[in-house]
Amino acid sequence: MTTHTKSDAPDTARTKSDAPDFASASVPRHLARGAAGFGSLIASVALIPVTGPLSLLLLPAGVLALRGCPMCWAIGLAQTISRGRLRRDCEDGVCSLRVAERADAGRPVGP
């Protein structure tokens, strides 16, 4: 029989998520990244009749601008919009989202 000490217990009261963060510094910057990414992906396929397989060199640029995939970009857009508006509170191993108070909303978020 083993006894578990407090240090053996998993850390369930985290305040920072280990999930990837796809958010940008601002919504206009994120939309510009989306325009560049989707534009590159579309152009890489649309220009095949004109430039041949050479246009496929735009694919990595589009994927890089979208930070992986279109879904990653969409998740980042949601994170960017909600940043500063939602707060995550964790108490006694239970985490919940709440709307930020007015004083919190004016505070700059991120670097």
Image (cartoon, grey):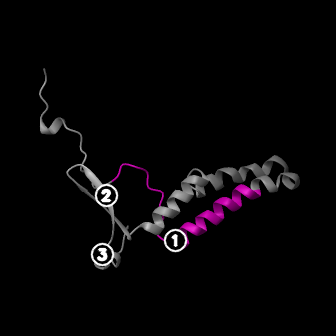
Eyeballing the image, is 53 above or below 83?
A: above
Residue at screen point 24% across, 50% down? 13
**Residue 54, x across and y down, in percent:** 79, 49
Image coordinates of residue 7 in percent, x first then y, are 15, 38
The x and y percentages for residue 64 are 59, 54
Residue contact between numbered discs 1 and 3, judged by CB atoms under 8 Å: no
Q: Is residue 43 visible?
A: yes
Disc 1 target residue? 27
Q: Could you tell which of marks 1 and 3 lies nearer the N-terminus? A: 1
Looking at numbered disc 1 in the image, what kind of residue is underneath it?
Answer: Val
Q: In the image, which is nearer the foreground, mark 2 or mark 1?
A: 2
Mark toward the start of the polypeptide (3 vs 2): 2
Most common SS among magenta residues: helix
Which residue is the site of mark 3?
Answer: 101
Q: Which residue sits furthest right?
A: 49
Task: Give neighbour class at mark 1: few <14, some 14-19, many 20+ (Cα, 10 Å).
Answer: some
Q: Quadrant of the N terminus?
A: top left
Give the foreground label among 1 and 3.
Answer: 3
Mark 2 belongs to which amino acid?
Answer: Ser
Q: Is residue 11 above or below residue 73?
A: above
**Distance between the Cα atoms at labels 1 and 3?**
21 Å
Q: Taking 13 as reference, is 58 left or right?
A: right
- Nearest the viewer among 7 and 110 is 7
Q: Is residue 4 above or below residue 13?
A: above
Q: Residue at x 47, y 68 (%)?
A: 81
Label located before the other in sequence (2 or 1): 1
The circle on residue 73 is none
Secondary structure beneath disc 1? helix
Q: Where are the magenta residues, as a range?
A: 17-43
